[in-house]
Amino acid sequence: MTFLEGLNTEQRLAAETLTGPLLIVAGAGSGKTRALTFRIANMISQGVAKPWQILAVTFTNKAAQEMKTRVERLLEKHFPGHDPKNVPTIGTFHSICARILRTHPEMIGREKSFVIYDDHDSESLVKRIMKERMVDEERIKPRAVMGAISNSKNRVRSAENLMKMATRPFDKTVAEIYAEYEKRLKQNNALDFDDLLLCAVRLFQEQPQVLDYYQEKWRFISVDEYQDTNHVQYILTKLLASKYRNLCVIGDSDQSIYGFRGADISNILDFEKDYPDAKLIKLEQNYRSTQSILDAADSIIEKNKQRKSKKMWTEQKGGDPIQIWHLGSEYEEAERITQEIERLRREEGAKLNDIVTLYRTNAQSRVLEEALLKSGLPYKVIGGVRFYARKEVKDILAYLRIVLNPQDSDALLRIVNVPSRKIGATTLQKLQAFAMGRSLTLGEMMKHIDMVTELPDSARSRLSQFWNLVERWKERSQKIVVSELLKEIIRDIGYKEFLTDGTEEGEMRYDNILELVSVSGKYDGLEPHESLSSFLEEVALVAETDKINREEDALTLMTLHSVKGLEYPYVFIAGCEENLFPHSRTMFNPEEMEEERRLMYVGVTRAMKRLYLVAAKQRQIFGEYQHNPISRFIHDIPEHLSERVGVEKSRVELFRVSEHDQRPKEEIMVRLTAEQKFKDGDHVRHASFGEGIVVERRGDLVTIAFLDKLWGIKKFAANIAPLEKIG
């Protein structure tokens, strides 16, 4: 086919392999989206598949939209007779599952108007349940409970399963909260992120006729970024592909960096075990970076054992050497990075939107921001408070949620007194108690508020007036699009007056509301009620990196986890030190250390033209100064590929631990954090204060409650204090 002539040999081979199981190992910057879109277009052009028989799944809305646009352009350009209405289904796992569940809501115990809870909504619900059950948030953190519930759902485990497996008090408490959390979600006609996938899997497992329908509908399936799939996504994909086995997965085991979210690298590593007849194609030609950057990346990642081997190459031979700086402190690090950015602008004409500064933890951004503010360089931080997580935006979205789904008790509790309607906490507690005692949602109670005789007439009147507004908005939602509905709600509740209190912050918060109205206008072309549900669905599933504006001339700051899938001509990676990157908690876990190495590989391969790796000899972490050696990842880069400032020539072994070191831990000289040296409840002895018990560990700090009440509770640096474990 002539339209395939622009592909390289391996890309073309991938585009021409149209049936059966196919594994495409695609290195960073190797044009995998190009190969995937050409393959989809070729399927249609060859008559192998009708457009509606093709499903392509990826992880972000941005990637899905890019893939969809490319496929449409290819078909429009090369196949003029193609009907533009007949296009493949392309979307994220979550959006596609949401679409499936909206078609069969009764089979999962929901109404079609179900709402999707984001992480903040889920956390609020978990906190409420914990408070009702008198679970101390200081003893058991809500986020830890949420993580355990999410992990269970990703492994397709119910609350009942978790209770059966529980061996610790924490696990039993989580299982109890999990069971109540599920009950409340159902009462609220809501699903959380994990439910979208889990409920789709259970629907397919329990309703064979539904599975068969989608197997027939999508006979050809492609999954992008397959290394990032978790267990439930793996099952979902396998179920859909089991009938026709036309499954193409594309990804790179060297870029699997989301293990903490449940991603399972074995999904891509074991693909050929699941499909012994699978064809393997490697995309190793890189179109992004110089050869020196690729060689540095390869030298870092080749130490990993869990990987599909490949060797990246490019026609951009040579390239600038990697800049490696070992500086005095985090302040010197930030100042030097800022100075270099100013030089790049002044001498090389670099634009700020071509530059990104990456770091391992969000806490590192503060010092960098201070230096940038001092210099006057404009910048933006990705991964701070997300637009859709801002209080004022969440408030208005809660109004929309309650209009779409009056059973959403959490949305109701959020906005029933925002702006103030003089409905206090005592009133709400009585209302909740009344509803729970009768197994009703708050929405159901609001319809019959006169029944709640425990409330004074004034409170019932105010609640009734509020609910009359909701009922009127619900009626209006059938007649006007979501942008107009938003304007009416904002006007009816006096939200502009509530926010604009004469301060600059108030004005900025109202600007966010105006931006929300603008965004909602995207759905004005849909039927009124559909525009409301579609808008809320996109808001729930949007990712922060989807909104990065590369046209804005500002430097970007973000974590290494956030930069996946992006590229920049100039890349700075700050904090390249042992115990920070690689992170201290990975030191004695070979699998986690391999993921840290993959994270560095991802950071390095974002660079197109110039790469800077920066470390500090001294850094303040958790209020304590640490002196950590330069990262092992830097020592893995051959010296001829780099220019080094302040880096010792000899390989520094002190404080370093090989990922696969088999020696006893006691023999390894390493600076341990408090989390590594102690666990809660350990009995210790201090040279001066006597015996005590470990009550908290954070970073390098350990908190000890001493048995001698004279000394009480004290904090110590784990590596300096004269502490020994005594049992």
Image (cartoon, rainbow, N blue to C red):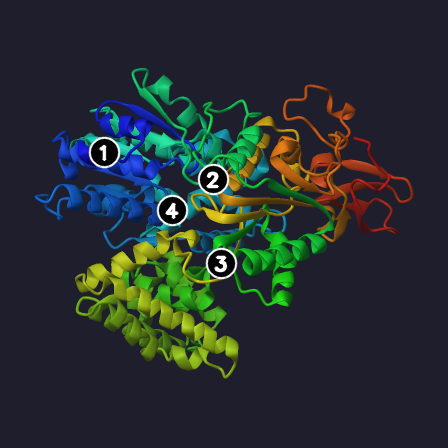
Residue identifier under label 3: 351
Using a 10 Å C-alpha cutoff, classify the residue at mark 4 as few (fewer than 14 neighbours), some (14 to 19) or many (20 or more): some
* Cβ–Cβ under 8 Å for marks 2 and 3: no
Residue identifier under label 2: 289
Specify the quadrant of the image occupied by residue 462.
bottom left
First-in-chain label (4 vs 2): 4
Q: Is residue 23 left or right of residue 307?
A: left
Locate residue 313, reporting x and y percent. 45, 30
Locate residue 356, reporting x and y percent. 52, 52
Name the residue type under label 4. Phe
Q: How many marks?
A: 4
Q: CA distance from mark 4 to mark 2?
A: 35 Å
Q: Is residue 651 left or right of residue 376?
A: right
Residue lying at the far top in this picture: please name it: 276
Name the residue type under label 2. Ser
First-in-chain label (3 vs 4): 4
Residue identifier under label 4: 193
The residue mark sitting in front, 4 or 2, is: 2
Q: CA distance from mark 1 to mark 4?
A: 38 Å
Residue identifier under label 1: 4
Q: CA distance from mark 3 to mark 1?
A: 34 Å
Q: Is residue 91 left or right of residue 161?
A: left
Q: Residue at x 30, y 24 (%)?
A: 22
Name the residue type under label 1. Leu
